[in-house]
Amino acid sequence: MEPKVYRTELTPVSFLQRSALIFPDKTAIIHENRSYSYREFAERVYRLASRLRALGLRKHERVAFLCPNTPALLEAHYAVPAAGGILVAINTRLNSSEVDFILHHAGCTFLFVDHELAPLLKTANLAGIQVIQIQDSGQPDDPYEQFLAAGSPEPVESWLADEEETISINYTSGTTGNPKGVMYTYRGAYLNALGIVIETQLTNNSVYLWTLPMFHCNGWCFTWAVTAIGATHVCLRRLDPERVWDILDQEGVTHYNGAPTVHIFLVNHPKAHRLARPATVAIGGAPPSPTLLAQMEQLNIHVLHLYGLTETYGPNTVCAWHPEWDALSPPNRRGFEHARDRCIRRPARHVSLVQTCKRHRAMARRWAK
C-alpha cells in the first residue's frame, strides 16, 4: 500500500487524546460518588486497551459489553477501537437467547458484563469467550478495576490503517426477526459526533446526563461528541425520574436525551420544577405532543427534535426551528414534511443500506453477516 502523504485517518479516539491534553484536570466523568478527570479517563482507557492486547486481542476482533450507562461502557468506546478491536455494546433489555445470538453472530472473543446483568448469561454458550465481570464499585477488588490495573496507562500504538474500517457493531432490537448488526466506521462515527456537537450546541462547559442508553447507536454518538468538546459525562445506571431531577439540580446538567415517554415521566413527577439553568434535550422516536413540548418549555427544558436509524449512527435529521413558525397553526407547520427523506421500499421487504436511506452521508458501512 502506498503511503498516504499528509493524511491522518479520522478516529473518535483522537477526541479523548485532545481533551486529555487540553483539559487534563477537568472533570470528564461523574458517576455516583466518584469522578474522573480527563487525564484519568485517558489513562483508564489506555489500561483497558493495553490489557486487551496483552490477552491476545487481534485486529478487528469483537469485544462485547453488556452494561448499563456506567464509566466502563464509556471507556470501552475508546479503549476497544484504540486496541484495534470492534465494540459490540449489547442492548440490556434483550432476553438471554437474544444476547447469546448476538455474542455468536458477532463472533465476540471478549465479554464484559455488569454484575446485575450476569443472569442473562446463564444459558449462553461462552466457549471461547473471555468473560470479565464489572461490579461498578470503582474499588480495587472490583474485577474490572483489577483488569485495568494490569494494563499500562501509556497510549497504545494505533493499528488503524483506514478510517473506513469498522469501529463498532450496533444490533437492532430484532422486532421482525433476529437482531441485525449494523457496522459503523471510524469516519462515520467521527463525523456524526461532530455533527452532534454542532446541532446540540455542546461546549466545554456542558454537562451531559446519560439518560439515553449507550448501547443505542453508541449513545447516538454522544459517547464521542461530549468528549470531543471537552464536556462532562454524568453516568446513570438506571432511569429513575426522582434521581434524574436530583442530578439535574446538583450537577447543573445542560444536555440530556430520550424518547417522549421518558419526558412524560419527568414532567409529571412530583419533583418536577423549572430549572435554574436551561437544559437542551434531544428527543427521538415518536413525535412529542404539543402538550409535552409546552410543559417542557415551562420547566426551562428546550427540545431539539431528531430522527434517525440504527443504520445512520442514530440522529441524521433535525427539526431546525424558525422563530416565525411560532405564530403558525399546527397544520401549517407541516409544510416541509418529507422534503428530503422518503421511504424507498416497504419496511417489511429486505433492502440494502443504500436503499434504506441513500441520501445520508453518514450511513453505516453494512450489516454484519
Image (cartoon, rainbow, N blue to C red):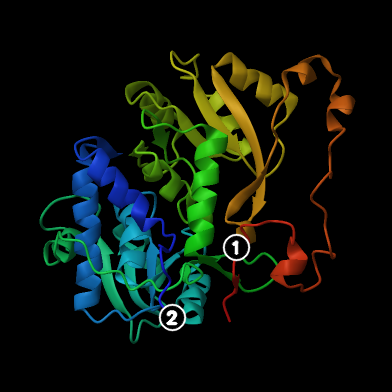
Q: Residue tagged by mark 2?
A: 2
The disc placed on residue 346 is none
Q: Is residue 87 left or right of residue 330?
A: left
Task: Judge whether 351 appears above or below 278 on screen.
Answer: below
* Residue that lies at the very extreme toward the bottom in this rendered image: 127
Which residue corresponds to the image point at 69% horizontal and 32% vertical from the top-left?
320
Which residue corresponds to the image point at 35% horizontal and 57% vertical from the top-left?
13
Rounded to the nearest angstrom, the CA distance separating label 2 from label 1 is 41 Å
List x then y, in percent, for residue 202: 46, 33
Asked if residue 216 can be seen in this view, the reply is no
Q: Is residue 287 left or right of residue 346?
A: left
List x then y, in percent, for residue 124: 41, 78
Q: Are marks 2 and 1 in contact (CB under 8 Å)?
A: no
Compare marks 2 and 1 and give the one earlier in the sequence: 2
Q: Residue tagged by mark 1?
A: 173
Q: Mark 2: which secondary structure?
A: loop
List x then y, in percent, for residue 126: 36, 81
Q: Amino acid at mark 1?
A: Ser
Dot 1: few (<14), some (14–19), or many (≥20) neighbours within 10 Å?
some
Image quadrant in which the C terminus is located: bottom right
Dot 2: few (<14), some (14–19), or many (≥20) neighbours within 10 Å?
few
List x then y, in percent, for residue 97: 51, 74
Q: Amino acid at mark 2?
A: Glu
Asked if residue 20 can be seen in this view, the reply is yes
Image quadrant in which the N terminus is located: bottom left
Q: Is residue 37 left or right of residue 182?
A: left
Q: To which quarter of the image does residue 356 belong?
A: bottom right
Which residue corresponds to the image point at 67% horizontal and 24% vertical from the top-left?
293
Q: To which quarter of the image does residue 252 belong?
A: top left
